[in-house]
Amino acid sequence: MKVLVIDDNEETLEVVSFFFNVNGIDCITEKSGKKGLEILQKNDFDLVLLDLAIPDMSGIQIFDTLKDEGVVSKKNIIIFTASFIDQKEVQRMLNSGAKGIINKPLALNDLEKLIELHLSV
């Protein structure tokens, strides 16, 4: 199983990567939204964790690009969000195929629930 995490926060990437690796799940991390989109377009992942507030290309832009390509439903995208993100945008993304939301700061029990829900481990 393979997970991609796109988030500009180094600490979040380290924690999430460690968590998935300890649970026997391959985890690829990317700080750049643009590079994350390229990786996502060229590879298949069982789950994608997507931060919405990435400076070079926001998670919203990444999501909308994938939506325009018609592949959102195939990607198992989970949104990382902080309270300052427009909740209407989050709801729009959920209505368009995102599989769920994890609020920041990240709680490891939320990741455990994701593994159970989306990875069938």
Image (tube, rainbow, N blue to C red):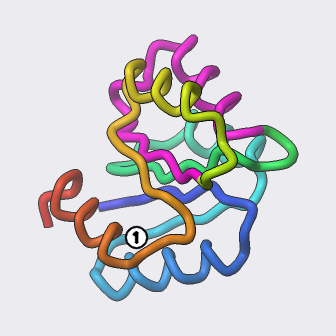
- In the image, is residue 64 part of the stretch drawn in magenta? yes
Quadrant showing the N terminus: bottom left
Pinpoint residue 88: horizontal percent, then vertical percent. 55, 25
The correct choice, above or below, for 99 with respect to 107 in the image is: above
The correct choice, above or below, for 95 with respect to 77 in the image is: above
Pinpoint residue 20: horizontal percent, then vertical percent. 38, 76
Q: Residue at x 55, y 34 (%)?
A: 87
Specify start and end residues of the magenta stretch as a single range. Answer: 58-81
Say left or right for 96 vs 23: right
Which residue position holds label 1? 26
Pinpoint residue 58: horizontal percent, then vertical percent. 74, 39
33 or 52: nearer the eye? Answer: 52
Tally of numbered tags? 1
Pinpoint residue 13: horizontal percent, then vertical percent. 61, 73
94 or 116: nearer the eye? Answer: 94
Quadrant showing the C terminus: bottom left
52 or 68: nearer the eye? Answer: 52
Q: Residue at x 37, y 50 (%)?
A: 47
Give residue 10's quadrant in the image: bottom right
- In the image, is residue 111 part of the stretch drawn in magenta? no
